[in-house]
Amino acid sequence: MKRLSMHLILESTIQTPTSFITIPKIAGGAMSGMSTRFRNGDTPKMETDRLISFCAAGQMVGGICAKTVRRKIAAGEFPKPVYVGRKPLLSEREMQAFIERLKKERGERA
């Protein structure tokens, strides 16, 4: 065990399906008994936002082709794309919000 600024550093081993992970724990002081565990649900899960192709975005809104998606982006009807290298992609979350906005507009007109 080593002393580091008046705290003891202990090692805790967690068994995973493929290997063992060693996580240092700080013992003593305000951090006593605290550790971070990732595989048991104690930490909040990050929501991910997928980037989808123009073809996939077209399928989300009824099967339109990628060229029509490009036209709608140019007209300002669809959200602007994100470029990964030279490839334009659309945010799946923004497309879902776009579809929900269309549904609300439909309900207001009726």
Image: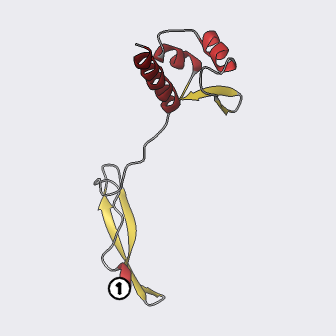
Q: Is residue 97 left or right of residue 65?
A: left
Residue occupying the point 36% across, 53% down: 44
Which residue lies most toward the right here?
86
Q: Is residue 79 left or right of residue 9?
A: right
Residue occupying the point 41% across, 86% down: 7
Question: Type of residue at label 1?
Answer: Gly
Residue 38 at x, y percent in the picture: 35, 56
Residue, disc 1: 28
Residue occupying the point 29% across, 53% down: 41
Q: Which image quadrant: the N terminus?
A: bottom left
| Above-or-below relation of 79 to 14 | above
Instruction: Depth check: give the residue in front, 81 or 8.
Output: 81
Residue occupying the point 33% across, 61% down: 37
Find residue 88 and report its image quarter. Answer: top right
How many labels were placed on the picture? 1
Residue 2 at x, y percent in the picture: 44, 85
Secondary-structure class at tag 1? loop
Instruction: Depth check: give the residue in front, 81 or 45.
Output: 81
Q: Is residue 67 left or right of residue 3?
A: right
Q: Residues within 10 Å of mark 1 (few under 14, many from 20)?
A: few
Instruction: Depth check: give the residue in front, 67 or 2.
Output: 67
Which residue lies most toward the bottom here?
6
| Above-or-below relation of 70 to 90 | above
Residue 71 at x, y percent in the picture: 66, 13
